[in-house]
Amino acid sequence: MKRHRVLPGFGLTIGWTMFYLSIVVLVPLSTIFLKATSLSWTEFCVDVLAPRTIAAYKLSFGASTAGAFVDSIFGFVVAWTLVRYEFPLRRLVDVLIDLPFALPTSVAGITLTALYAENGWLGRWFTPFGLKVAFTPLGITVAMAFVGLPFIVRTIQPVLEDLEPEYEEAAATLGAGRLQTFRRVIFPTLLPALLTGFALAFARALGEYGSVVFISGNMPFRTEVVPLLIMSKLEQFDYPGATAIAVVMLAISFTILLGINGLQKWAGRRLMAS
Amino acid sequence: MSIELRNIRKTFGDFVALDNINLRVATGELLALLGLSGSGKTTLLRIIAGLETPDAGEVLFHGADATTRSVRDRNVGFVFQHYALFKHMTVFDNVAFGLRVKPRVERPVEAEIARRVHKLLTLVQLDFLADRYPSQLSGGQRQRVALARTLAVEPKVLLLDEPFGALDAKVRQELRRWLKRLHEEIKITSVFVTHDQEEALELANRVVVMNNGRIEQIGTPEEVYHRPATAFVHNFLGNVNLFHGRIENGKVYLGDTAVDVDRAHASASGNGKAVLALRPHLIEIITRPNGKPSFPATVISVNPAGPQVKVELVAEWGDAVQVDVGHERFDELAIAPGARVFLRPKEEKLFVYQI
C-alpha cells in the first residue's frame, strides 16, 4: 500500500539527490577507479606498496587523526566558552572561528611556516627544547589542526546551546559534582556531535594540500603526505601511479568515515526522540 | 524535615519576583504553591532547592540556616516539569544515577544499587521498563521515572515544579491520586508548584496562594476555598463573578441595588469602593423581585450541557454575570436568551472586599 507523507515530493527529491550525487561525487570518483584499472595487478601493487607510498599513508592518516584529536579537545573548549560565558568581543571571536574556512589554504600554510620556522615568532620558543615544528610531522599536524578547528566548534555549538540547564540542575540535586555532571551527563549528550565534527575535521585534514605543502618540507619518507605524493607523481606524468595511490586512499578514507558514522549512530541512537 | 523561609526577597533586574516571603512547611506536610505564571512560585521552589539564591532573607532546614548551603548538600529531591531525564541513559541508569555519583565511601555496591533501583521502580510501577530509554516512554511514565530517580537518594524534602503540567488531563488525574497515596506512604516533606487550583485543592494539606511575588493566603484547601482572604484568591479558586460597587453606611451598592453587608463574610466597613465576589452557583435567578435584595439582568445565552445549566447574563449596569442553575430549577424558570430576570445573591455566602 502506498504510504502518504505529509510532505510530498519524495520521488522528485530522491531522484534529484541521486542525480546530483552522481554528477558531483560518483562519476569523478569512479573515473579514478577506471584510470587505475589501466595498471596490471602487479604494477598496482608495486605503486601502492612502495615504501615511500606506505610512509606517506602512515603520515597522512597519523597526522590527520592527531590533528582531529587536537581539534576535538580545543574545539570543545572553544565551543563551551562561546556558548556558556558572556565576555567582551564574544561575537568577534565567534566570527574568527570561521576564518580557517575562508582563508586560502596556501596563505595559511605560508603563515604557519613563517611562524613555526626555527627562527619564527613561535618556533623560536620551541628551539631551546630541541623541538622542531616546521618541516616535521608535528608541523603537518599543526596545519591540519588549523584547518579542522571550525568543524568541531560548529558541530558542537548548536547542540551545546540546546542543552537545557535543567539536566545539570537535576544532576546537582542528585548529588553529582561538576566533574561528574560533565562526564556522565554533558559529555555523552555531546558525543554524537563531537564525532561528526571529528569525522569532518579528519576528512578535511586528509585531503589538505595547500597549507601542508609549505610547512611539511615534502621530504620523501619523512614529511611527504599522500596528496603531495600524488602531486609529484602527476608532475612526472605518472597518471596511473597517482590514481592507484588515490584509489587506496579513497578506500581507506571511506572505511574510516563509515566506521565513525556507525559509532556516531550508536552514540546518537539513544538520544533520538521517538 | 521542616522548612522555614524568612523575609525572602528576589529580583531579576527591575522585576520583583519575590517580595518578603515568610513561610513554614511542617515535617511530613504536602504543601502546594499555587499561582499564575510569573507569580514567583517556581522561583520560591528553586530557592528552597538552592538552584537560586535569594537577594535577602533566610532559608532554614530543620531550624538550621541553609541559605548558603549548595544544592548538592541540601539533600532535596527536585522533580522538573519536563522530567529532565538523562536521555542517553536507560530508566535503570537514570534511577541509579544519584547512588552512583555518591562519594566512594558512601556508595553502595552495584548489587545493592540494583536492588534499590528495582525496589523504587516497583514502587512507581515501572520495573518492566528498566531497560528502556526515556524517549521510549510516555509522559506519565517519564515523570514517574523522574520521581523514582529523585527518591533514590532518599531526600529529606521533595520539591516538585509543575510535576503534571506537561501531561494530558486524564494522566494528570491518575498521577495526582497516585502521588497522594505515595505521600501518605512515605510521609516526606513535600512542596509542589502548580497553576491548577483543582490540583492544589485535591492534593495538598495546605495551599499557599501567590500573586505578584507575594503570598495572598496560606490555609487548608477548605479554608482558601470557602474563606478566601482576598478578591484575588476568591477569583483564582474557582469561577466567580466580581462586581465593582461601593459601600455606603454599611450597605453595599451594586448599581442602584443595595445589598445588606452585615451578613457578609468579609470585613467591609466604612465607606468607599468595594468588590463583591459571588460564585456562579450562589446566585439565584428569580422572575420577579420578592422583596429581598436583587438586581435586574438580561439573559444572553444558555448552555444546558453539563451537570448544571450555565446561564450567561448581563447586569443592568453592564457587568457580565455567570450563574449556574440546577436543571430542575431551569425547567421551572423556562428562560431563554433575551429574557429579563432578577438575580438574588444568596446572602449568607456574600464576600465583599474593600479596595
Image (cartoon, coloured by chain):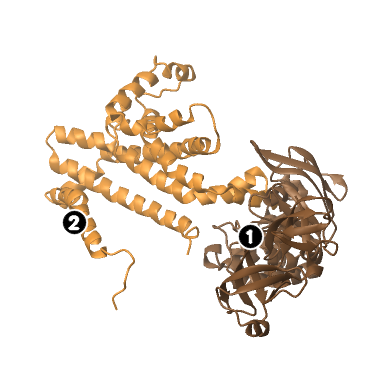
Chain colours: A orange, B brown
Q: Chain of mark 1?
A: B
Depth check, front residue: B4 or A26: B4
CA gap, disc 2 and disc 1: 74 Å
The residue lying at 35 percent from left, 54 percent from top is: A258
Q: Position of residue A217 (x, y in %)?
A: 30, 25
Eyeballing the image, is B40 above or below B262?
above
Q: Amino acid at mark 2?
A: Phe
The residue lying at 24 percent from left, 61 percent from top is: A14
Q: Amino acid at mark 1?
A: Trp
State the image quarter where residue B77 is shown.
Answer: bottom right
Depth check, front residue: B296 or A100: B296
Q: Chain of mark 2?
A: A
Image side of residue A121 versus residue B72, left or right: left
Let me know if residue B83 appears in the view.
Answer: yes
Which circle marks residue A19 in the picture? 2
State the image quarter where residue A71 is shown.
Answer: top left
The residue lying at 75 percent from left, 41 percent from top is: B9
Q: Position of residue B178 (x, y in %)?
A: 70, 72
Q: Residue furthest right?
A: B63
What SS does tag 1 mark? loop
Let me know if residue B105 appears in the view.
Answer: no
Discs 2, 1 touching: Cβ within 8 Å: no
Quickly name the residue at label 1.
Answer: B317
What SS does tag 2 mark? helix
Q: Residue furthest top?
A: A119
State the image quarter where residue B264 is shown.
Answer: bottom right
Image side of residue A162 versus residue B13, left or right: left
Image side of residue B160 versus residue A72, left or right: right
